[in-house]
Amino acid sequence: MRGEITASSLNMRDQPDRSGKILGRLPRGAQVEILEKQGGWLKISYQAGSAFVSGRYVREIKKSPEGDFYWQKPAFQALPLPGDPIDLRALARQKRIAEVWNRYGNLLSVLSQTMGIEVGCAVAVLFVESGGEGFGADGRPVIRFENHQFWKYWGKNNADVFNTHFKFSPSARWKGHRFRKKKNGPWEDFHGNQKKEWRVLNFARKLDDSAALKSMSMGAPQIMGFNYKKIGYATVQDMVAFFSRDIRYHIFGLFDFMDNAMVEALKKQDFTAFAKRYNGPGQAAIYGGKIQEFYEAFRSLRL
């Protein structure tokens, strides 16, 4: 059974009681999987486990027909995430990529087999994008807000306001990103700090919600919000809602995002060609080299 959040922001707790610890918050319109009802509370699927929300603010929705995207297929949604565990004590260099396998290896294996690629390719891509971490310590998805994309989707038509609060390098637009909330305040770097990334995103959302969400990359696969249609969502808000709900949708997003050219590149282990399409041409050789490195590290585990 599925439900849709009707409150502007709904707390998820570790037990069905208002005194329960808050694990995170769901925005209006987010969809959740309802596992069971407990009085006036609902137990829902959350990350790799479960959480509780007040049933007063959840509207039950009818089951939608199965779609063509991985995230829409119940058979994949029900798969266990972890792979057969690797003993991390015997590892050194390979330990971090083995941890990705231990968390998500089973789902990655099934989807890789369906797509016709080696699972090591998927593990390596996921690791390079985010270290395999889809959520921060505060329970929110890992994001990166891109000033130059916000300029494209909103700033160029609102230049005075944009230039008051956002900066990027004109020669290398993905660099030099800085932000200030107040007109005469100091400029600050924010990349590499999730609390600051979310602060900038939330400020931008007040200027234009859709433009702001399109301008950030999200979750374990770090997919840009403007790709929401490509991975099967009707709106960028829907993409954010699903990615906020469960790490599975991050992994589904990785596979739904791969087009035929990316798949062929991975089959040939041409990781630079893959990175050119996945990450863009600007740093394709760098990203491709990293994917190659961790692909080889994964293969050395000899699963």
Image (cartoon, helix red, strand yellow):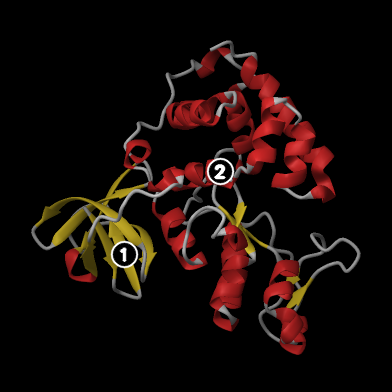
Q: Nearer the viewer, residue 132 or 96?
A: 132
| Quarter where residue 229 is shown | bottom right
Which residue lies under the disc numbered 2?
A: 254
Position of residue 249 relative to residue 227, above or below, is above
Point out residue 200 in the picture as x, y percentages from the top left corner: 62, 70
Q: Residue furthest left?
A: 39
Residue occupying the far right of the picture: 171
Three-letter amino acid code of the residue under disc 1: Asn
Q: Residues under labels 2 and 1: Cα distance?
A: 28 Å
Please give the name of the residue rendered at 47% of the width and 67% of the height, measured from the top-left corner.
237
Please tell me whether mark 2 sits on a helix, a strand or a loop: helix
Note whether residue 153 is visible.
yes
Q: Position of residue 96 (x, y in %)?
A: 59, 28
Is the residue 227 above or below the residue 264 in the image? below
| Circle 2 or circle 1, nearest the eye | 2
Depth check: 38 or 283 in front?
Answer: 283
Q: Position of residue 191 (x, y in %)?
A: 69, 58
Q: Is residue 112 above or below residue 178?
A: above
Drawn side of residue 242 relative to residue 176, left or right? left
**Amino acid residing under circle 2:** Leu
**What residue is pinned by disc 1?**
11
Q: Which residue is at 72% across, 80% downward?
A: 155
Q: Residue at x 91, y 64 (%)?
A: 171
Q: Residue at x 64, y 39 (%)?
A: 260
Q: Residue 204, image x and y in percent? A: 61, 76
**Image check: 16 left or right of 225?**
left
Asked if residue 185 shows in the view, the reply is no
Q: Secondary structure at mark 1?
A: strand
Q: Nearer the viewer, residue 40 or 59?
A: 59
Circle 2 residues within 10 Å: few <14, some 14–19, many ≥20? many
Q: Which mark is residue 270?
A: none
